[in-house]
């Protein structure tokens, strides 16, 4: 690409790599760097060292390996030192809580994070074993900590790990903390600036007490007595943290007929039974679906490695239906609105969604006289909304990427809570000889049929980023005048100021809206080298219209493929 000066990138990468050879690395790490320098293929050297791994507005995520642009104990330490410097400047209550998932080096990175915090005289609570990300969010608030860190790359492939930062409200960091922390982290541009003199007296190991408090909170979210429920549940943790809390949460709701996918129940850094530990990927559900069929169970739940997302499949007369994130978010919000006693809420209730999540949720809220707010993509914006709207009461929210939340004692998407609530909805449907698909059909009959799909283009490396940027520029400069054979009447560029008063930050997102309120949204992924296209169309509910709407979306996907692939 013309914008990339390859020789400069290579030269800078070599300088950084040689600089690292002067640090106190172990022999394997030194040999790895020397091999990168000697290799004829310099692309890996460049990708490892051409820049510092970006500490973004929520933390950082990247491929595990040696180098400034990789996740390793050194980049983890530098990030923690920067975060420590910010905590010391901004907070009197200097304390943190740390959790980690089942990924490669997660435990080691978590302990290293604790060591750096303690070296900086910051009290640190460290979970004794792997725990879900939403439980970390809960623990930050429960323990009254300044911040929280979870070592995870969520649903990314096994080659990745990450570092997510939460503030004292239990939500991922937002303005002004995000930009201020980024500034402090950027100042730690050398391994020599890390304080490594750990203080063991400041590190406290968390036991089952915090687990019990978390589950007891979840238990109170149940609207029904499910003790005698006939619902047969299959659960897979996809080798992640869900196994520690999902069965407990289901039991707390009264469910006892739970079958575990044993081959996926043990933590496994290689996620050996799946191509990718992402419940959005149908392949990840294969083992669970087989068990669902063999045991003639009703519902399969599958959580990602850090248990903030859950995928669901249901078995209806041996026909398997996989529900997408928009459908699950709709079901949860519909059920909560239908069952919650608004008279017991002293504040005005509201629900929340992201701008790429189904518009059906807004329609349900409006018909029930409940406020619905749309935020930028990322649950941290929903958490920010909960924190800022203190005179209102958040009751439920969701995003299309399989993340949902009920109540506000957790401030991130929570697959533990969601698993229990989804099973209660399925059990409630059974009382009327229905299933989750039947409930969705009832919703479509009342509020209209909405069909959504997601299409992604994967573009890796430096050239991939350039290609993604080029496509976004192309849409800004040459946006189509029609989508789904319908005239575009509105284009929203979230890099500019929008009419939505909830949205304060700029974001690299473009949204096209047609006369019939069909929507195409495109945005680069914040966690993977992908460009995402979101499609949402609607009509009156009928089988004929389902076929028509799906065909409209498929036609748009073909246009995008021809134009950009």
Image (spheres, rainbow, N blue to C red):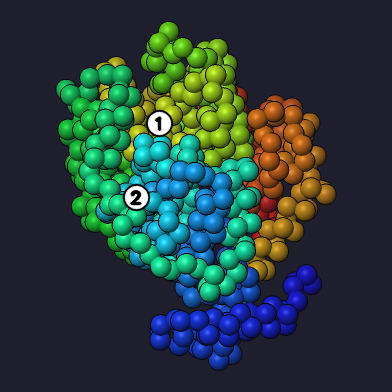
Q: Is residue 143 above or below residue 119?
A: above
Q: N-terminal of the two: label 1 or label 2?
A: 2
Q: Does any portion of residue 389 appear in the rendered image? A: yes
In this view, 74 is above or below 255: below
Which residue is painted at 60% across and 58% down in the image?
A: 184
Tell me the quadrant of the picture where the C terminus can be found. Answer: bottom right
**Residue 139, how many percent across, how many down?**
36, 41
Under tag 1, what secondary structure? loop
Q: Residue at x 38, y 64 (%)?
A: 198
Image quarter (top left, top right, bottom left or bottom right) of the N terminus: bottom right
Q: Nearer the viewer, residue 551 or 443?
A: 443
**Residue for point 49% across, 30% down:** 397
Q: Are marks 1 and 2 in contact (CB under 8 Å)?
A: no
Per the model, the C-alpha gap separating discs 1 and 2 is 19 Å
**For the residue labelled by badge 2, is the local secondary structure a helix, a strand or a loop?**
strand
In the picture, the disc for residue 125 is 2
In the figure, 104 relative to 174: above or below? below
Q: In this rendering, which labeled residue sits more in front, label 1 or label 2? A: 2
Q: Is residue 543 left or right of residue 15?
A: left
Q: Position of residue 278 (x, y in %)?
A: 42, 52
Q: In the rendered view, does 108 fall on the left or right side of 255? A: right
Provide the residue designation for mark 1: 409
In the foreground, 114 or 201: 201
Mark 2 Cα-neighbour bin, 10 Å: few <14, some 14–19, many ≥20: many
Query: Badge 1 local density, few (<14 within 10 Å), some, or many (20+)?
Result: some
Q: Residue at x 35, y 31 (%)?
A: 422
User: What percent of the width, then of the height, locates residue 271?
Assistant: 34, 61
Residue 445: % across, % down: 50, 18
Please say whether residue 451 is visible from this viewpoint. no
Q: Is residue 252 above or below residue 432?
A: below
Q: Residue 210 — which label?
A: none
């Amino acid at each position: 690409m013309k914008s990339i000066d390859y020789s400069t990138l290579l030269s800078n990468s070599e300088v950084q790599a040689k600089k690292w050879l002067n640090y106190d690395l172990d022999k394997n790490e030194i040999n790895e760097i020397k091999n990168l320098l000697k290799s004829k293929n310099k692309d890996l050297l460049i990708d490892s060292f051409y820049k510092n791994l970006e500490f973004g507005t929520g933390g950082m995520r990247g491929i595990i390996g040696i180098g400034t642009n990789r996740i390793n104990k050194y980049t983890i330490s530098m990030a923690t030192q920067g975060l420590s410097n910010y905590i010391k400047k901004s907070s009197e209550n200097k304390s943190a809580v740390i959790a980690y998932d089942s990924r490669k080096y997660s435990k080691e990175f978590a302990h290293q994070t604790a060591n750096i915090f303690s070296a900086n005289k910051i009290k640190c609570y460290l979970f004794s074993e792997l725990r879900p990300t939403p439980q970390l969010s809960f623990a930050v608030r429960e323990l009254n900590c300044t911040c929280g860190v979870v070592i995870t790359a969520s649903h990314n492939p096994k080659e990745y790990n990450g570092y997510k930062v939460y503030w004292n409200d239990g939500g991922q960091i937002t303005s002004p903390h995000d930009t201020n922390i980024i500034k402090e982290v950027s100042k730690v541009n050398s391994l020599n600036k890390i304080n490594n003199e750990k203080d063991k007296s400041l590190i406290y190991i968390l036991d089952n007490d915090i687990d019990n408090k978390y589950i007891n909170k979840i238990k109170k979210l149940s609207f029904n007595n499910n003790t005698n429920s006939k619902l047969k549940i299959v659960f897979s943790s996809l080798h992640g943290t869900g196994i520690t809390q999902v069965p407990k949460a289901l039991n707390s709701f009264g469910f006892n007929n739970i079958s575990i996918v044993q081959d996926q129940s043990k933590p496994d850094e290689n996620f050996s039974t799946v191509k990718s530990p992402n419940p959005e990927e149908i392949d990840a559900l294969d083992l669970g679906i087989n068990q669902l069929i063999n045991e003639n169970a009703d519902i399969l739940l599958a959580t990602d490695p850090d248990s903030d997302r859950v995928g669901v499949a249901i078995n209806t007369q041996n026909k398997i239906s996989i529900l997408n994130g928009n459908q699950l978010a709709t079901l949860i919000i519909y059920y909560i609105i239908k069952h919650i006693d608004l008279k017991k809420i002293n504040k005005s209730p509201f629900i929340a969604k992201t701008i790429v999540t189904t518009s059906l949720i807004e329609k349900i809220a409006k018909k029930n006289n409940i406020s619905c707010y749309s935020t930028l993509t990322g649950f941290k914006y929903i958490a920010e909304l909960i924190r800022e709207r203190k005179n209102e009461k958040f009751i439920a929210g969701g995003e299309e990427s399989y993340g949902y939340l009920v109540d506000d004692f957790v401030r991130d998407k929570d697959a533990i809570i969601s698993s229990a609530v989804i099973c209660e909805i399925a059990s409630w449907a059974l009382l009327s000889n229905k299933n989750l698909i039947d409930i969705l059909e009832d919703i479509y009959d009342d509020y209209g049929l909405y069909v959504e799909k997601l299409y992604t283009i994967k573009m890796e490396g430096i050239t991939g980023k350039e290609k993604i940027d080029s496509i976004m520029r192309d849409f800004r400069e040459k946006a189509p005048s029609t989508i789904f054979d319908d005239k575009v009447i509105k284009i929203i560029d979230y890099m500019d100021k929008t009419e939505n008063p909830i949205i304060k930050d700029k974001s690299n997102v473009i949204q096209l809206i047609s006369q019939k309120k069909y929507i195409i949204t495109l945005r680069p992924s914040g966690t993977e080298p992908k460009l995402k296209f979101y499609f949402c169309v609607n009509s009156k509910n009928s089988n004929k219209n389902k076929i028509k709407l799906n065909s409209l979306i498929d036609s748009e996907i073909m246009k995008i493929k021809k134009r950009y692939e």
